[in-house]
Image: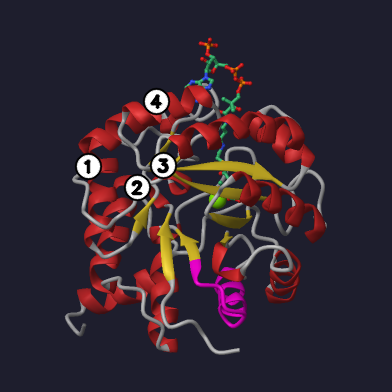
Amino acid sequence: MAYPEFLKIVEVGPRDGLQNEQRKVPLADKIALVDRLAAAGLPAVEAGAFVSPKWVPQMADSAAVLAGIDRRPGVAYPVLVPNLKGLEAALAAEVREIAVFGAASESFSKKNLGRSIAESLEMFAPVIETARDKGLAVRGYVSCVLGCPYEGEIDPGAVAEVARWLRERGCYEISLGDTIGTGNPKSARRLIETVARDIPISELAVHFHDTYGMAIANIHATLEMGIGVADAAVAGLGGCPYAKGATGNVATEDVVYLCQGLGIETGVDLDKLVASGRFVSEVLGRAPASRVNRALSAKMAQGSC
Ligand code: HMG
Ligand code: MG
């Protein structure tokens, strides 16, 4: 199959990327990161999570992040919302898009949300309904779609069931999360084939973590199947507090570089994106995990780029 002409990249660095950081990231740096990513041309920048601060302390200042950013017309700033308390806070922060986040693994669901899959969906139902009534767009995540840190392999049928539920309730797009990054192009293809039996491929997004270095290969495989939306985190930030050992998301710089090579538009300015990746890496005191970032930064430093 031909590649899509355009890949929409949902930048999840400020949320998925930073949620696992042990040291408090200064509010001003979070705000600057979101603004830089939007200025680089990303059409959606996940800006925070209205979750319990006891569960994920790093996201406790999400309302302040939303208040501090310079909202650009045409850019979406979604946030994670698990329950009505979170929705209330998101509405007060004048959020226009939220994401609920279910899982295909019972054990992960209990660790991440303190609930079984069925109980978590029960929690999401009034959140989705109220949010939609208020005119908000609602995205749905399914985590652990290609493996679970507690249960190992996950049946694609279990993923399809949660994805179907989210879509039937009104999520406009379902993001399929390889939370621990154990997938490969073959398992990723099998997953999309299964889920796409019930959900049009245009309503699916992929969300790969790069723990085993397979994320960019998985994106390529799913692009060939017609996937048109991919989540990514600048500098390859990320990890999940409830999935020990899982490393960052696929780096946004790597996805943009891949797309440039394949002739797929993303609307992202790679130089500005690389600068954003360097910025956040300096804040965190480490080198960007993105190889594209490291290569282009080295080239720029030599003055040959
Ligand atoms: P719970 O403990 O069952 O909730 O947690 P509760 O209702 O019993 O409340 C406990 C306390 O939390 C109370 O405070 C509540 O007020 C407070 P206390 O009375 O003890 O002082 N609370 C809240 N505070 C602020 N905002 C809220 C909120 N809700 C309750 N929304 C809950 C249930 C769902 C809240 C909890 O399990 C939670 O916050 N989980 C979120 C965990 C999380 O964010 N994980 C990372 C994101 S998922 C992910 O990374 C995967 C993804 O990236 C895709 C992929 O990679 O595959 C999406
Ligand atoms: Mg993730």
Provide residue 153's location: percent of width, then percent of height.
81, 56
Name the residue tied to disc 3: 136
- Quadrant of the snapshot with the N terminus: bottom right
Dot 4 crowding, Cα within 10 Å, few <14, some 14–19, many 20+: some
Name the residue tied to disc 2: 77
Label 1 or label 3, whichever lies nearer to me, is 3
**Could you tell me how far apart the alpha carbons at marks 1 and 3 are, in whole angstroms?**
19 Å
Provide residue 238's location: percent of width, then percent of height.
49, 50
Mark nearer the N terminus (4 vs 2): 2
Mark nearer the N terminus (1 vs 2): 1
Secondary structure of the residue carrying tag 3 is loop
Q: Nearer the viewer, residue 113 or 217?
A: 113
Residue 15 falls in image quadrant: top left
Say which residue appears at 50% left-offset and 40% top-offset. Answer: 20
Say if disc 1 is inside 8 Å of ligand 1: no
Are discs 1 and 2 less than 8 Å apart at CB?
yes
Q: Report if residue 245 is visible in the image.
A: no
**In the figure, 300 relative to 178: above or below?**
below
Name the residue tied to disc 1: 69
Secondary structure of the residue carrying tag 4 is helix
Taking the magenta stretch, the answer to whether it contains residue 289 is no
Say which residue appears at 63% left-offset and 38% top-offset. Answer: 242
Provide residue 194's location: percent of width, then percent of height.
76, 67
Name the residue tied to disc 4: 89
**Could you tell me how far apart the alpha carbons at marks 3 and 4 are, in whole angstroms?**
14 Å
Residue 260 falls in image quadrant: bottom left
